[in-house]
Protein backbone atom coordinates (compact mmCIF):
# COMPACT_ATOMS: atom_id res chain seq x y z
CA UNK A 1 0.00 0.00 0.00
CA UNK A 2 2.83 2.36 0.85
CA UNK A 3 4.69 1.37 -2.34
CA UNK A 4 1.73 2.37 -4.53
CA UNK A 5 1.33 5.73 -2.72
CA UNK A 6 5.00 6.49 -3.23
CA UNK A 7 4.76 5.71 -6.98
CA UNK A 8 1.73 7.95 -7.44
CA UNK A 9 3.26 10.87 -5.58
CA UNK A 10 6.48 10.50 -7.58
CA UNK A 11 4.55 10.54 -10.91
CA UNK A 12 2.58 13.63 -9.88
CA UNK A 13 5.58 15.57 -8.75
CA UNK A 14 7.57 15.07 -11.95
CA UNK A 15 5.18 17.33 -14.04
CA UNK A 16 4.75 17.24 -17.85
CA UNK A 17 7.45 16.20 -20.27
CA UNK A 18 8.59 18.53 -23.06
CA UNK A 19 6.88 16.31 -25.64
CA UNK A 20 3.55 16.54 -23.80
CA UNK A 21 3.79 20.34 -23.64
CA UNK A 22 4.61 20.55 -27.37
CA UNK A 23 1.68 18.30 -28.29
CA UNK A 24 -0.65 20.42 -26.15
CA UNK A 25 0.61 23.62 -27.82
CA UNK A 26 0.14 22.16 -31.31
CA UNK A 27 -3.40 21.07 -30.48
CA UNK A 28 -4.20 24.48 -28.98
CA UNK A 29 -2.79 26.24 -32.09
CA UNK A 30 -4.81 24.04 -34.45
CA UNK A 31 -7.97 24.63 -32.43
CA UNK A 32 -7.37 28.40 -32.43
CA UNK A 33 -6.72 28.43 -36.19
CA UNK A 34 -9.89 26.50 -36.98
CA UNK A 35 -11.91 28.76 -34.69
CA UNK A 36 -10.43 31.92 -36.24
CA UNK A 37 -11.14 30.74 -39.79
CA UNK A 38 -14.71 29.84 -38.91
CA UNK A 39 -15.26 33.22 -37.26
CA UNK A 40 -13.67 35.04 -40.21
CA UNK A 41 -15.92 33.17 -42.65
CA UNK A 42 -19.01 34.15 -40.65
CA UNK A 43 -17.93 37.81 -40.50
CA UNK A 44 -17.14 37.87 -44.23
CA UNK A 45 -20.54 36.40 -45.06
CA UNK A 46 -22.15 39.03 -42.85
CA UNK A 47 -20.21 41.82 -44.62
CA UNK A 48 -21.26 40.51 -48.03
CA UNK A 49 -24.89 40.24 -46.96
CA UNK A 50 -24.83 43.80 -45.56
CA UNK A 51 -23.27 45.16 -48.75
CA UNK A 52 -25.84 43.32 -50.88
CA UNK A 53 -28.72 44.65 -48.77
CA UNK A 54 -27.33 48.19 -49.02
CA UNK A 55 -27.00 47.80 -52.79
CA UNK A 56 -30.64 46.75 -53.21
CA UNK A 57 -31.80 49.40 -50.75
CA UNK A 58 -30.04 52.03 -52.86
CA UNK A 59 -31.67 50.73 -56.04
CA UNK A 60 -35.13 50.74 -54.44
CA UNK A 61 -34.63 54.30 -53.18
CA UNK A 62 -33.49 55.47 -56.62
CA UNK A 63 -36.43 53.83 -58.39
CA UNK A 64 -38.88 55.33 -55.91
CA UNK A 65 -37.44 58.81 -56.47
CA UNK A 66 -37.65 58.53 -60.26
CA UNK A 67 -41.19 57.17 -60.01
CA UNK A 68 -42.29 60.09 -57.80
CA UNK A 69 -40.69 62.70 -60.05
CA UNK A 70 -42.26 61.33 -63.24
CA UNK A 71 -45.66 60.86 -61.61
CA UNK A 72 -45.57 64.53 -60.55
CA UNK A 73 -44.64 65.95 -63.97
CA UNK A 74 -46.56 69.06 -65.06
CA UNK A 75 -46.97 70.66 -68.47
CA UNK A 76 -45.17 73.98 -68.38
CA UNK A 77 -43.71 76.05 -71.26
CA UNK A 78 -39.95 75.75 -71.57
CA UNK A 79 -38.09 78.92 -72.57
CA UNK A 80 -35.73 76.79 -74.64
CA UNK A 81 -38.55 75.24 -76.66
CA UNK A 82 -41.63 77.53 -76.38
CA UNK A 83 -43.65 75.66 -79.02
CA UNK A 84 -43.40 72.24 -77.41
CA UNK A 85 -43.88 70.87 -73.92
CA UNK A 86 -41.76 70.70 -70.81
CA UNK A 87 -40.25 67.22 -71.22
CA UNK A 88 -36.97 67.19 -73.12
CA UNK A 89 -34.23 64.69 -73.76
CA UNK A 90 -30.62 65.38 -74.57
CA UNK A 91 -27.76 63.30 -75.96
CA UNK A 92 -24.52 64.91 -74.84
CA UNK A 93 -21.20 64.96 -76.67
CA UNK A 94 -19.69 62.50 -74.19
CA UNK A 95 -22.41 59.97 -75.07
CA UNK A 96 -24.40 60.49 -71.88
CA UNK A 97 -28.21 60.56 -72.05
CA UNK A 98 -30.48 62.78 -70.00
CA UNK A 99 -34.02 64.07 -69.76
CA UNK A 100 -35.53 66.90 -67.75
CA UNK A 101 -39.01 68.03 -66.80
CA UNK A 102 -40.86 70.29 -64.37
CA UNK A 103 -42.51 68.54 -61.45
CA UNK A 104 -45.08 69.58 -58.85
CA UNK A 105 -43.65 69.65 -55.34
CA UNK A 106 -45.56 68.54 -52.21
CA UNK A 107 -47.84 71.11 -50.54
CA UNK A 108 -45.42 71.67 -47.67
CA UNK A 109 -42.49 72.60 -49.96
CA UNK A 110 -41.22 76.17 -50.18
CA UNK A 111 -41.77 76.30 -53.94
CA UNK A 112 -44.60 74.89 -56.00
CA UNK A 113 -42.54 73.65 -58.95
CA UNK A 114 -39.02 72.41 -59.60
CA UNK A 115 -37.14 71.46 -62.73
CA UNK A 116 -35.41 68.12 -62.32
CA UNK A 117 -33.66 65.71 -64.63
CA UNK A 118 -31.82 62.41 -64.79
CA UNK A 119 -28.52 61.72 -66.52
CA UNK A 120 -26.93 58.40 -67.48
CA UNK A 121 -23.28 59.13 -68.09
CA UNK A 122 -19.98 57.41 -67.56
CA UNK A 123 -20.60 54.76 -64.92
CA UNK A 124 -23.20 56.68 -62.92
CA UNK A 125 -26.86 57.69 -62.79
CA UNK A 126 -27.31 61.26 -61.59
CA UNK A 127 -30.30 63.38 -60.58
CA UNK A 128 -30.19 66.99 -61.78
CA UNK A 129 -31.89 69.82 -59.91
CA UNK A 130 -32.16 73.39 -61.21
CA UNK A 131 -32.38 76.29 -58.76
CA UNK A 132 -34.77 78.16 -61.08
CA UNK A 133 -37.37 76.07 -62.92
CA UNK A 134 -37.85 78.90 -65.43
CA UNK A 135 -34.18 78.99 -66.43
CA UNK A 136 -32.95 75.54 -67.48
CA UNK A 137 -29.85 77.12 -69.05
CA UNK A 138 -28.39 77.55 -65.57
CA UNK A 139 -26.03 74.86 -64.33
CA UNK A 140 -27.92 72.09 -62.56
CA UNK A 141 -26.85 70.67 -59.23
CA UNK A 142 -25.89 67.00 -59.61
CA UNK A 143 -26.55 64.21 -57.15
CA UNK A 144 -25.08 60.77 -57.85
CA UNK A 145 -27.71 58.10 -57.24
CA UNK A 146 -25.96 54.98 -58.55
CA UNK A 147 -22.24 54.51 -59.14
CA UNK A 148 -19.97 51.84 -60.67
CA UNK A 149 -22.46 50.90 -63.38
CA UNK A 150 -21.36 48.97 -66.45
CA UNK A 151 -24.20 50.42 -68.54
CA UNK A 152 -27.04 52.92 -68.19
CA UNK A 153 -29.62 54.06 -70.77
CA UNK A 154 -33.11 55.52 -71.17
CA UNK A 155 -35.89 54.67 -73.61
CA UNK A 156 -39.27 56.34 -74.07
CA UNK A 157 -42.69 54.82 -74.74
CA UNK A 158 -44.64 56.56 -77.51
CA UNK A 159 -48.41 56.81 -77.90
CA UNK A 160 -48.48 53.63 -80.03
CA UNK A 161 -46.78 51.57 -77.33
CA UNK A 162 -43.37 51.45 -79.02
CA UNK A 163 -40.08 52.03 -77.22
CA UNK A 164 -38.02 54.81 -78.76
CA UNK A 165 -34.41 55.85 -78.07
CA UNK A 166 -35.48 59.51 -78.18
CA UNK A 167 -38.48 61.73 -77.60
CA UNK A 168 -39.68 65.01 -79.08
CA UNK A 169 -42.50 66.82 -77.31
CA UNK A 170 -45.21 68.45 -79.39
CA UNK A 171 -48.48 70.25 -78.54
CA UNK A 172 -50.44 67.00 -78.87
CA UNK A 173 -48.02 64.77 -76.99
CA UNK A 174 -46.15 66.62 -74.28
CA UNK A 175 -44.97 63.57 -72.36
CA UNK A 176 -44.06 60.02 -73.35
CA UNK A 177 -46.32 57.40 -71.86
CA UNK A 178 -43.41 55.92 -69.94
CA UNK A 179 -39.68 56.02 -69.38
CA UNK A 180 -37.54 52.92 -69.22
CA UNK A 181 -34.29 52.85 -67.26
CA UNK A 182 -31.91 50.04 -68.16
CA UNK A 183 -28.78 49.53 -66.09
CA UNK A 184 -26.12 46.88 -65.69
CA UNK A 185 -24.50 46.81 -62.27
CA UNK A 186 -20.79 46.28 -61.60
CA UNK A 187 -21.35 42.55 -61.00
CA UNK A 188 -23.08 42.17 -64.38
CA UNK A 189 -26.70 42.12 -63.18
CA UNK A 190 -28.99 43.68 -65.81
CA UNK A 191 -31.99 45.58 -64.43
CA UNK A 192 -34.83 47.11 -66.43
CA UNK A 193 -37.37 49.35 -64.76
CA UNK A 194 -40.33 51.11 -66.41
CA UNK A 195 -41.88 54.27 -64.97
CA UNK A 196 -45.21 55.80 -65.90
CA UNK A 197 -45.19 59.52 -66.66
CA UNK A 198 -47.96 61.40 -64.81
Image: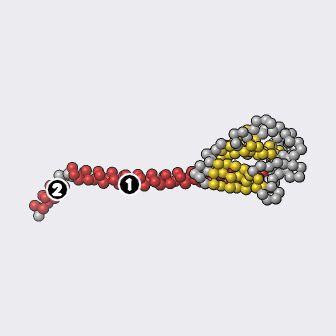
Q: Position of residue 131 (x, y in %)?
A: 78, 38
Left or right of 67? Residue 10 is left
Q: Residue at x 65, y 47 (%)?
A: 146
* SS category of the residue bearing label 1: helix
Residue 11, labelled with which disc? 2
Question: Comparing marks 2 and 1, which lies closer to the viewer?
Answer: 1
Left or right of 45? Residue 3 is left
Query: For mark 2, does the 10 Å Cα neighbourhood hold few (<14), some (14 to 19), or many (20 or more) residues?
Result: few
* Residue furthest bottom as drawn: 1
Q: Position of residue 114 (x, y in %)?
A: 80, 43
Asked if 141 appears above or below 13 in the picture, the reply is: above
Left or right of 2? Residue 80 is right
Tell which of 64 and 184 is nearer to you: 184
* SS category of the residue bearing label 2: helix
Q: Residue at x 52, y 51 (%)?
A: 47
- Give residue 9's quadrant in the image: bottom left
Q: Position of residue 74 (x, y in %)?
A: 84, 49
- Give residue 88's quadrant in the image: top right
Q: Position of residue 95 (x, y in %)?
A: 70, 42
Tell which of 108 and 92 is nearer to you: 92
The residue identified by callout 1 is 34
Report whether residue 107 is seen. Answer: no
Amino acid sequence: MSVNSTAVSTACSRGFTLMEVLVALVLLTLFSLVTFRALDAVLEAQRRASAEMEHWRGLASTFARIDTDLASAVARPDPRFPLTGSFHIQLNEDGSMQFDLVRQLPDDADQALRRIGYRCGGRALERLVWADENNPLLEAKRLALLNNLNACAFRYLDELGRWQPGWQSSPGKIFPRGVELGITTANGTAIRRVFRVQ
